[in-house]
Image (cartoon, rainbow, N blue to C red):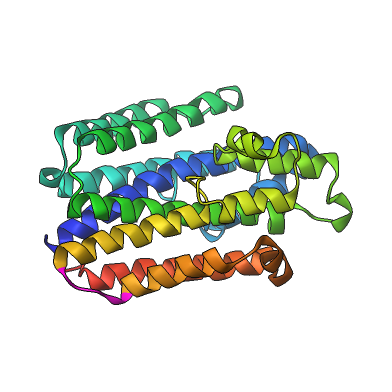
Amino acid sequence: MLGKTAGGLFWMFRYLERCENNARLIDAGFRIALTRSATAKSEWKSILTTAGSLADYDDRHDDYSSAEVVDFMLRDPTNPSSVISTMKQARDNARLVRTALTREVWEATNESWMTLKQILAAPVAEQDLPDVLASIRRMSAQVRGATAGTMLRNDVFNFIRLGTFIERADNTARILDVKYYLLLPSIAQVGSAIDVMQWETILRTVSAQRAYRWLNGAEISPSNIAEFLILYSKMPRSLIFCSQKISDNLGYLEQDYGVSLASHEAAKASTQRLRKASIDQIFDQGLHEFIQEFTAQNSRLAAQIEHDYRFLE
C-alpha cells in the first residue's frame, strides 16, 4: 500500500473519531455547566482547553458564553477542531482513498457530511443541542458500522483502526483530565453532590454509565471511575483497551509485511506500562500528571506510525 493511502485512511478515521469526540466534549460542558451555573463560563473555558482550542477561541472572542463556545466548537469553519471542520477533513480524506473503501463506507461518510451541513446550517438553540449532539454520535456510529460490516480485515482495515484508537485514547484521557484537574476548584468539594454528579457526567460523555453500573452498582467514586476508564480492558473507550488495539493492529501489519518497526515496540511498551499499573499508583503519581504523560506518549506513537509507514510519501 502507498504511504499516502495509508495516511489518508489513518487520518480519515482520526477525524471521524475527533468529530464524535468533540460532540462528546460539548455534551460534557453543557451538562457540567448546568450543575454549576454560577461558574459556567469557567467550565466552558476548561472544555476549550481540553479540546486544545483555547488559543484559537481567544483570538476571536472576548467571553466564554455558552452560545459562543458551542457555536465555535460545532460550526466555526475557521476552527480546525470544530465538528464541521473535522467532518469535512474526514470526508476529504475519504475522497482521497475512495478506491480503498467499500461503497457502504463511502456512502455513510458522505451522507454524514451532507446531513451535518444541514443541521449546522444555523446556530443551534440550547434546547436543541442534546438532539444535535446525539445525531452527530449516530453518524459516527453508522460509519463505524459500515466499516465493521463490509471491510476486509487487511492492511486497509488496520490503518483505519490505528487512526480510530489513537484518537479515542487521546479523547478519553482529555475527558478524564477536564474533570479531575480543570473542573474541581476546591478540595472541599471532593465527595460532594456536585463532585459525584460531575463524575457521572464524565461516564455519560464516554457512553459508559450503564457499563460502569453493571460492574460497580450505584457506588460512584473517583478511584473506581478512573480505574474503569484507564485500566479496565473490556471497556471500549478505556486507555488500556485502546492501547491494546493499537498494539494488535500494528502486530497484524508486522505479520503482513514481515517487518518490525519502532512504532510496534513503542505500542507494546505502552500497553505493558498500563498492564503493570494500578489505580493507587496512578493517583499517587497524580492523575493529571499521569494523563499528561500518557497523551504525550500517544502523540509520539502517532508520529512514529506516520514516519514508519511514510504517510507523506
Q: Could you tell me residue 73's position as x and y percent?
A: 50, 44
Taking the image as drawn, is residue 49 in sight?
A: yes
> Seen in the image, is 160 located left or right of residue 68?
left
Q: Quadrant of the C terminus?
A: bottom left
Residue at left offset 33%, top offset 54%: 163
Taking the image as drawn, is residue 77 in sight?
A: no
Magenta stretch: helix, strand or loop mostly:
loop
Q: Could you tell me residue 151's position as x and y percent?
A: 20, 40
Above or below for 218 versus 172: above
The quadrant in which residue 310 appears is bottom left
Q: Could you tell me residue 301's position as x and y percent?
A: 39, 69
Does the magenta run of residues contain 198?
Answer: no
Q: Quadrant of the N terminus?
A: bottom left
Residue at left offset 44%, top offset 54%: 242
> Seen in the image, is 94 located left or right of residue 48?
left
Between 28 and 121, the one nearer to me in the picture: 28
Above or below for 298 versus 133: below
> Seen in the image, is 210 located left or right of residue 254?
right
> Seen in the image, is 130 located left or right of residue 200?
left
Between 242 and 98, the one nearer to me in the picture: 242
Residue at left offset 25%, top offset 54%: 158
Q: How many numbered marks are there? A: 0
Residue at left offset 76%, top offset 36%: 35
Above or below for 267 versus 156: below
Kindly give the residue lying farthest to the right in the view shown. 188
- Residue range corresponding to the magenta coloring: 258-262
Q: Could you tell me residue 196's position as x and y percent?
A: 77, 41
